């Protein structure tokens, strides 16, 4: 068996690094220039509600045991 010299792959890493730095440079300075020269006339305001995906709520007795019945209904205010 003959010993082969290791292949130099540094050119591919350097090439992709340069392309990556150029891309980041264009994005950062392009967006910066766009933000300097662009005026925003207004904003879009919307009304929304953040809601849990499910209405499930776990109820557990503070000292242990099994809860036999829950008398409160959904959305009803109760006293502690």
Image (spheres, rainbow, N blue to C red):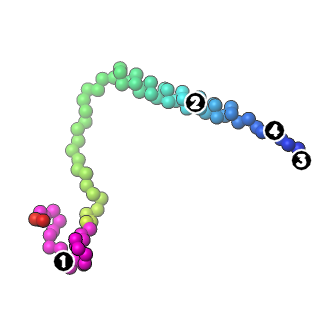
- Count of residue discs: 4
- Rendered view: 36 above or below 79: above
User: What is the C-alpha distance between the residues marked 4 and 3?
Assistant: 13 Å
Quadrant of the rendering where the C terminus is positioned:
bottom left
Residue 61 sits inside the magenta stretch: yes
Q: Position of residue 41 (x, y in %)?
A: 26, 26
The numbered dot on residue 36 is none
- Between disc 2 and disc 4, the foreground one is 4
Q: Residues within 10 Å of mark 3 (few under 14, many from 20)?
A: few
Foreground disc of the pair 1, 4: 4
The CA span between labels 2 and 3 is 39 Å
The residue that appears at 68% across and 31% down in the rendered structure is 11
x, y percent for residue 55: 25, 63
Q: Between disc 2 and disc 4, whose residue precedes?
A: 4
The CA span between labels 1 and 3 is 82 Å
* Residue at horizontal 61 percent and vertical 33 percent from the top: 16
Mark 1 or 3: the one toward you:
3
Q: Residue 5 carries which label?
A: 4
Q: Nearer the viewer, mark 2 or mark 3?
A: 3
Give 3 or 17, whichever is nearer the viewer.
3
Q: Do the residues labelled 1 and 3 touch (CB within 8 Å)?
A: no
Left or right of 71: which side holds 7? Answer: right
Give me the disc on residue 1. 3
Estimate the x, y position of residue 10 in percent, counting from the top left.
68, 33
Which quadrant of the figure has residue 17? Answer: top right
How many angstroms separate mark 2 from mark 4 (CA)? 29 Å
Q: How crowded is mark 4: few (under 14 residues within 10 Å), some or many (20 or more)?
A: few
Q: Distance between the residues labelled 1 and 2?
A: 65 Å
Magenta span contains residue 35: no
Question: Which residue is identified by label 2?
Answer: 19
Q: In which quarter of the image is residue 58?
A: bottom left
Mark identifier at residue 69: 1
């Amino acid at each position: 068996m003959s010993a082969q010299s290791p292949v130099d792959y540094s050119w591919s890493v350097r090439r992709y690094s340069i392309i990556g730095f150029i891309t980041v440079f264009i994005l950062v300075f392009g967006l910066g220039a766009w933000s300097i020269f662009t005026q925003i006339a207004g904003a879009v305001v919307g009304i929304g509600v953040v809601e849990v995906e499910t209405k499930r709520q776990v109820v557990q007795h503070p000292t242990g045991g099994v809860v036999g019945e829950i008398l409160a209904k959904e959305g009803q205010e109760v006293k502690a």
